[in-house]
């Protein structure tokens, strides 16, 4: 039987139990934070402690994606000896350079794969497919969840995954209610004159939002976050996306599944009356709900306390 590895980068939001059960491999994302190296690799303890600390400052977290050696190490030590095919699902390439980094690293080292396979007395045939999820956070996770389902429940062969995944990707919708708008501030231009692709809010909008407690409700569209509305306080922003999702549920989803991630410790959101009522309504409509902590990578982009909800349109 063909041994298939699903690999995602750390910004893919799903419960840790799902990754463990299905042996989903994680490409870690490395940051420098307060003078130390911070590894975002979906470890619950690390993520919890990060959110629990009082040192969360998006300006102090600097991504370090020039970690080709770590990708090579993962391939050599964990993937190539144990799997015959690998499907890498990454965050939207417009939101992160990781898709390009993985493609470049695997291309530059493909001649080494044969030697590594021979070291373990394995067939030298080894297939790698890299897929841009065209999504982020809970949406990235939802594609990974459905891909695992296609492989397990539907028993779709590895070489036939491309078509159903491509049909599914544009149907995944992601809504985000923000809380800490500091992360949304428009950054200064880089040395080459360009601006970061993660910026969403001008300095003036930030100042007005801070004074009036306006929390943007965002939607991912073509790799960019667009602002659907600005609500008074986080609870109203969260309620806005709950209402939108429930409206979509009433109209009918493409699959009875909603994936949720929260940029903080889950007890904070799970004890919120509005969130509990939202989950109960989903359950009453026979919708399966998954809830996980948002990755540190995601929180850097949209701020602590943000909630991301994804579903599949018909």
Image (cartoon, rainbow, N blue to C red):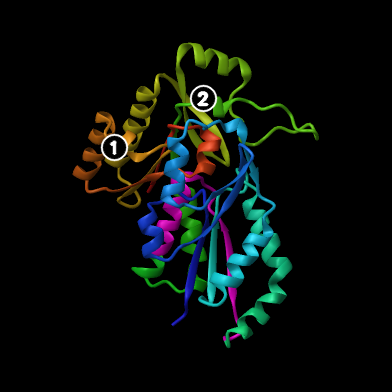
Q: Indicate the position of residue 257 as horizontal and vertical percent values.
A: 32, 50
Q: In which quarter of the image is residue 85?
A: bottom right
Question: Residue shown at 60%/49% (left/top)?
Answer: 30
Q: Name the residue under label 2.
A: 181
Q: Which of 84 and 53 is in front in this view?
A: 53
Indicate the secondary structure of the residue bearing disc 1.
helix
How many residues crowd mark 1 within 10 Å: few (<14), some (14–19), many (20+)?
some
Residue 296 counted in the magenta span: no
Q: Nearer the viewer, residue 306 or 66?
A: 66
Q: Indicate the position of residue 140 as horizontal and vertical percent values.
A: 48, 50
Number of labels in the image equals 2
Kindly report the distance in space between the C-alpha atoms of the residues bearing marks 1 and 2.
22 Å
Q: Which tag, 1 or 2, sits closer to the chain's start? A: 2
* Residue extending farthest front: 35
Q: Residues in magenta?
A: 122-148
Question: Residue shown at 66%/27% (left/top)?
Answer: 187
Q: Indicate the position of residue 125 as horizontal and vertical percent values.
A: 60, 82
Q: Nearer the viewer, residue 292 or 44?
A: 44
Q: Indicate the position of residue 51 as horizontal and vertical percent values.
A: 45, 37
- Looking at the image, residue 39 lies above or below residue 222: below
Indicate the secondary structure of the residue bearing disc 2.
helix
Question: Residue shown at 55%/29% (left/top)?
Answer: 183
Mark 1 near mark 2, Cβ–Cβ under 8 Å? no
Image quarter of the N terminus:
bottom left
Q: Name the residue under label 1.
A: 270
Q: Is residue 276 left or right of residue 210?
A: left
Which label was assigned to residue 206? Answer: none
Residue 144 counted in the magenta span: yes
- Looking at the image, residue 271 lies above or below residue 77: above
Question: Can residue 173 be seen by looking at this rendering?
Answer: no
């Amino acid at each position: 039987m063909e041994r298939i590895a699903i690999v995602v980068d750390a910004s893919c939001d799903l419960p840790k139990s799902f990754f463990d059960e299905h042996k989903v491999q994680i490409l870690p994302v490395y940051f420098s934070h307060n003078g130390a190296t911070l590894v975002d690799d979906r470890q619950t303890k690390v993520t919890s402690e990060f959110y629990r600390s009082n040192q969360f400052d998006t300006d102090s977290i600097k991504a370090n994606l020039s970690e080709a050696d770590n990708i090579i190490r993962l391939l050599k030590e964990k993937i190539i000896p144990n799997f015959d095919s690998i499907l890498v699902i990454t965050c939207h390439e417009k939101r992160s350079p990781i898709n390009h980094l993985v493609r470049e690293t695997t291309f530059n080292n493909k001649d080494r794969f044969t030697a590594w396979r021979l070291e373990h007395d394995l067939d030298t045939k080894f297939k790698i497919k890299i897929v841009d999820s065209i999504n982020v956070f809970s949406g990235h996770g939802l594609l990974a969840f459905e891909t695992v389902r296609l492989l397990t429940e539907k028993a779709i062969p590895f070489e036939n995954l491309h078509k159903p995944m491509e049909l599914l990707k544009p149907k995944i919708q992601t809504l985000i209610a923000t809380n800490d708008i500091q992360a949304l501030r428009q950054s200064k231009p880089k040395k080459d004159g360009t601006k970061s692709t993660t910026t969403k809010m001008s300095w003036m909008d930030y100042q007005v939002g801070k004074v009036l407690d306006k929390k943007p409700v965002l939607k991912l569209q073509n790799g960019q976050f667009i602002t659907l509305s600005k609500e008074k306080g986080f609870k109203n922003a969260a309620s806005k996306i709950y209402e939108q999702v429930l409206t979509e549920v009433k109209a009918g989803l493409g699959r009875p599944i909603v994936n949720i991630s929260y940029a903080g410790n889950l007890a904070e959101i799970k004890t919120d009356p509005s969130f509990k009522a939202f989950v109960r309504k989903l359950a009453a409509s026979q919708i399966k709900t998954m809830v996980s902590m948002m990755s540190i990578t995601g929180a850097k982009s949209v701020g602590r306390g943000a909630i991301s909800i994804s579903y599949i349109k018909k």
